[in-house]
Each structure stands twice: as structure tokens, then as C-alpha cells.
Amino acid sequence: MAGADSTPDHPAGAWLVHLATQRKLSANTVAAYGRDIAELARLTGNRDWTQVGTDDIRRHAARLHAAGQDGRTIARKLSAWRGFFDWLADHAALAVNPVAGVRAPRRTKALPKALSVDDAVQLVATPARRAAAAPTPAELCNTAMFELLYSSGLRVSELCGLDVHYRKADGSTAASTGWLEQDNGEVVVTGKGSKMRRVPVGKAALAAIKGWLAVRPAATDGSLALFLSERGNRVSPRVVQLRLKAHALATGAPMHVHPHMLRHSFASHVLQSSGDLRAVQEMLGHASITSTQVYTALDFQHLAQVYDRAHPRAKID
């Protein structure tokens, strides 16, 4: 009989002894393999191991998936089962390993985290400074950066690469790869694959940028960088990340916030309001619509949460 019996006289028990004594696996690893084999024994009704077929394994893997186990966990269990049957083939009349060729369900790709509309607006609109104190140039720079990240869904590298305006190559200096066009209310950015695109900038972000430019000093590195570090040179993605993290903590954001989260929030919120997936794709600079479609799942997730909170028949005791 197959089974959860882990004594050396039974195949599963003998295999576990082999793992511990011959392969020198740790006690924790052997115990984990033991649990996986015990689970398979229960799923098969303690049938003789040599009578377990590939269809049985597929059915049991599907049952685990239906019970809510993710692809990574099921893949690990299949690996343990496969190893056991490989060993069993050397010790019993086993024609073929029933786990061979059986794959775990696809791993569910984690959805990107996005702020709610209220939390995103609260984050970028709230200055992290003392009440009644005039904003410092650094604070004005931060406000402009955070507003622009959320307003236009830029990658942090695209934000850092922006110049105050377009600079034409003159033979000694490369042409700008990204710049602000205040009059048009747009930024021109160079994204992945060196593809350039134009993205609208909202009124709040334009106002914040205008406030920053009024106090922006000349860059110490001689560049036209739109956003500067405390040393006066072009700001780096790492600096933006650290500033945003500190700002989020200071303003009471409900979760750890990083620049890409503002990009996710931008995409999710524009899609919720417009339903125009192609427009969101163009603004994000995605080469394929498939990359943008993840935000439709975020949109549905939002709708499901609203339904669960609001509909009187969503939850029945």
C-alpha cells in the first residue's frame, strides 16, 4: 500500500531515509518531502504506488489548484513526487514515472500595487513641511517631481532625464532626450527602446513645476536638468526614490510608496475614468498592449471591492 507511513519498511519511509542518509538532506527538507508524499497518499486513497498513473497526478494537481494553492507551491510538490517516483523505479516494478511531463498551473502574476485616487491625490498635494513655514526650494522641487510622476505616469528614469527645455545638439553636446514644453502642457520623454513620446501634464503638476522653476538655481554640472539634487546636479532615480519614501512617511501614506507605484496609480486611475486602454498604452510608452492590460485587472479589482462594500447582497450571513 502507498501511504503516509514513513517507516523504512514502506516505500515512502525508505525514500525519506535515503534522502537523509544518502543524499544528506537537512531534517527540515526531509520533513517537507515527507509531508508532500503524505499528502499524495491521501489524495490517492493510499493506493499502491505502482498503480498511480499520470492522469491521477494531473487530477490531484488540479484539485490542489482549485483549493487555492498557487503554482509555485504545486510545482514544489510535483518536484517532490517526481523525485520519489524516480527513486521508486529503481526499487519496484514501475514502468514510467507518472509525474514526468506534468506541469504545475501557471504562476499568477502579482498585480502592481496602486494607491487609491484619494490616497494618491493626498500624497502629491500635501506638503511635508511645518505649518506656516515657507516652502524651501528642495520642497518645491519634491512637490513638482511627485506631481509630475502621478500626472503623467513617467518612469523615474524618464523624470530624471528631463531638461527645462529642448537643447539642440551642437556637435559637442548631445541633443536632449527629454524635456518640458510648458506652453503645450506636455513633456517629451525617451522611454524603453529609445522611443520618444509626448505625454500631457496636468494643471496641478504644471503649477508645481512653475513654482519650482521660480527658485531653481543654475545646475552645478552645467546641464539643463529640470530637477536637481541638493548638490545642484541632475537628480538620480535613487534620490527620487528616497525623497518620495520620506515624503510618504511624513504625510501618513497607508503603504510604502515608490516612484513606480505612482506610475501604476496614474495608469489605473486614467483607465478607471476613461476605459481607453490604447490611450493609456501610448501615455505609458508600452510597446505591446499586453503590458497595459494588467491595469484592466486592477480596475476590475477596484470594482469588486466597491461591490463587496456597497451591495446589500454581496455578503450573505
Image (cartoon, rainbow, N blue to C red):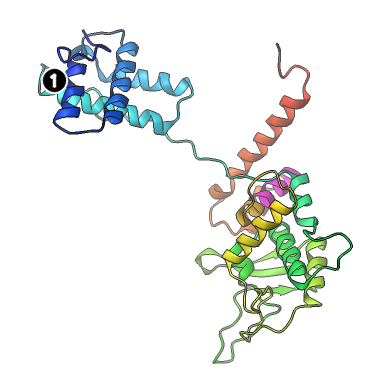
Task: Identify which residue is drawn at 16% across, 19% down.
Answer: 14
Viewer-closest of 167 and 289: 167
Viewer-closest of 138 and 158: 138
Task: Identify which residue is drawn at 71% across, 13% down.
Answer: 316
Q: Farthest residue toward the right?
A: 132
Is residue 159 within the magenta segment?
Answer: no
> Residue 205, image x and y in percent?
78, 63
Residue 202 shows in the view: yes
> Residue 148, image x and y in percent?
72, 62
Q: Farthest residue toward the bottom?
A: 171
Task: Identify which residue is drawn at 67% across, 83% down.
Answer: 219
Note whether 313 is above or below 310 in the view shown: above
Is residue 269 within the magenta segment?
Answer: yes
Residue 96 shows in the view: no
The residue stretch that appears in magenta: 264-275
**Could you tell me which quadrant the C terminus lies in?**
top right
For mark 1, does the 10 Å Cα neighbourhood hold few (<14), some (14 to 19), or many (20 or more) residues? few
Viewer-closest of 132 and 4: 132
Q: Main secondary structure of the magenta part?
A: helix
Residue 50 occupies quadrant: top left
Residue 11 occupies quadrant: top left
> Residue 9, image x and y in percent?
14, 12
Residue where numbered disc 1 is placed: 95
Amino acid on which disc 1 is placed: Ala
> Residue 136, image x and y in percent?
79, 71
